[in-house]
Image (tube, grey):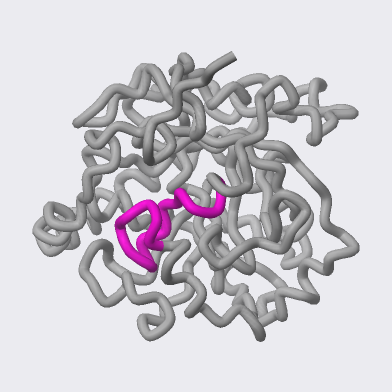
Amino acid sequence: MHVHRRTHFGISESQVTEEHIWRARRLFLQKSALSGAALLGSSLLSRHVLSKPSPPESYAGLDFKKLAAKDKVTEFKAITTYNNFYEFGTGKDDPAKYAHTLKTTPWTIEVSGACHKPGTFDVRTLAPKKQWEERIYRLRCVEGWSMVIPWLGIPLAPLLKRFEPTGNAKFVQFETLYRPNEMPGQKRAVLDWPYVEGLRIDEAMNPLSFLALGLYGKTLPNQNGAPLRLVVPWKYGFKSIKSIVRISFAEKMPITSWVKASPKEYGFYSNVNPQVPHRRWSQKRERRIGEFRKHETLMFNGYGDYVADLYQGMDLKKYF
């Protein structure tokens, strides 16, 4: 059977338009407005953290290797040459070109905030290779493309519990390395560096939340977020922050990088929801990297059986 393949892995030019010009213009104006909005949003959302439902019974015996088994795994070359990692540039091939400059050893993670056991830890101690497991997860980009990746790493929840978060910890904030000499994209005002992301703490404790240190049986390549990145499979890919150096337990909702850059287009939750369009394109369909045909976008990226309970009673168009 002949399969037609487009260049750039089948992605149209309208989906990969560089956005750094309009983001830079907006950045200054948004900083002052977002401070007040974050305080209001934090108070409105915190009530959902306090009343988290019990995990569904369907978690019992879940085989994470088979969770996305019906999907064809994306080719390794595509996974490692077509990336969003703006710390190395806004082009999809920029990370593969320039990420070799990043030094990933030694690498430490600073843990702080509302927890009883803060500190600075070597990534090899936090996540030794003998503890790694494989999970096949779909990753859906807001631009309309998706991948199916066999990740290697550790579940997020057990790691966070080791730091003993207090009852005041309602959110978990993650921060990327800031080192412009090694990450040349940080020399441009594409975003307000360093990159910041966050989850509600019950989202972070969900069994699907994962810290990846490798893929395809190999150590994580620099362009994919080495040595440690977040993978939240029911959310858009930009929530899966790369090259993490700080984890903070917070009482208030973090102002994340994409919310700061364009709050009308990128919400804090960023759940895959085909009924909430991006302001410049629809989210109802997607194209797998390496394929020509499109797929219908699934609510929560197809993981609704395992995460929908987290958002019970919430208006997911308002809290997008």
Rendering coords of residue 159 (x, y %): 75, 60
Q: In which quarter of the image is the C terminus?
A: top left
**Res 228 quadrant in image:** bottom right
**Res 192 quadrant in image:** bottom left
Rendering coords of residue 103 (x, y %): 56, 82
Vertical comparison of 37 with 31: above or below: above
- In this view of the protein, can residue 226 be seen by the observer? yes
Rendering coords of residue 10 (x, y %): 40, 31
Residue 84 is left or right of residue 125, and the answer is left
Task: Write the residue at 12% across / 64% down.
Answer: 28
**Res 180 quadrant in image:** bottom left
Q: In which quarter of the image is the N terminus?
A: top right
Residue 145 is left or right of residue 305, and the answer is left
Front residue (pair 218, 31): 218
Vertical comparison of 137 with 157: above or below: above
Vertical comparison of 126 with 141: above or below: below
Rendering coords of residue 216 (x, y %): 72, 49
Task: Write the residue at 46% across / 38% down.
Answer: 236
Residue 29 is left or right of residue 51, and the answer is left
Front residue (pair 139, 15): 15
Count of residue discs: 0
- Magenta span has 114? no
Residue 316 is left or right of residue 116, and the answer is left
- In this view of the protein, can residue 320 be seen by the observer? no
- Magenta span has 93? yes
Task: Write the residue at 30% across / 46% down.
Answer: 40
Span highlighted in magenta in the image? 79-94
